[in-house]
Image (spheres, helix red, strand yellow):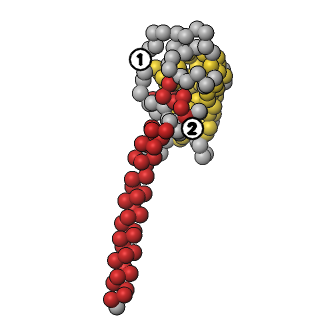
Amino acid sequence: MKTHNKLVKRLLLASVLMFAFAFALVPLYDVFCEVTGLNGKPSLQPAEVSAEVVSERLIDVSFLTHIQGEAPFTVEAEPTVITVKPGEMNHVTFTAKNVSGQNRAMQAVPSVSPGLAAQHLHKVECFCFNQQAILAGEQAELTLLFYLDNELPAEIEELTLSYAVFDISGS
């Protein structure tokens, strides 16, 4: 019987430690990504407008959207690729359509590749800052207003801004 008590205590301790480790993973991952520049998580806060444009440098920026799960939306950027100068304000329009027969809400979650470019991409206005309610069968024009700062590493000549689109109607 004593052997079983010892085993139960060890298993209970192991379970508590595993739970604590799992609970700590998300903040640890965020710290790791911030330190290393991995994961391409851009800021979700509006940025200040840039005052200085570097006219001799050009960077290609591509826009992708990925509809997650069974979300009843189509979302496309127009244009899908633009060439920008650091510090220059850029405007891109995304067209979102609710292809279902019900009023729905969507949320777009951005990521940047390469990840090191994320801290240099500044969104002044972005549809990803807020949830977007779209009526059944309706289409909406969504705005992205952004610039790349002048500190973008010279080896980065192109980057991709990708949005994962989620149906949050049941939230």
| Residue at the image position 44 percent from the left and 30 percent from the top | 44
Disc 2 marks which amino acid? Answer: Ala
- Residue 113, position in %: x, y? 59, 33
- Could you classify mark 1 by the number of other residues whose Cα lies within 10 Å: few (under 14), some (14-19), or many (20 or more)? few
For this orientation, the residue located farthest to the front is 154
Disc 1 marks which amino acid? Answer: Glu
Q: Mark 2 points at which residue?
A: 164
Q: Nearer the viewer, residue 74 or 123?
A: 123
- Residue 136, position in %: x, y? 57, 34
Q: Nearer the viewer, mark 1 or mark 2?
A: 1
Is any part of residue 136 visible from this angle?
A: no
| Residue at the image position 50 percent from the left and 20 percent from the top | 151
Q: Mark 1 points at which residue?
A: 48
| Residue at the image position 58 percent from the left and 8 percent from the top | 55
For this orientation, the residue located farthest to the bottom is 1
Which numbered disc, 1 or 2, marks the residue that appears first in the sequence?
Answer: 1
- Residue 97, position in %: x, y? 60, 30
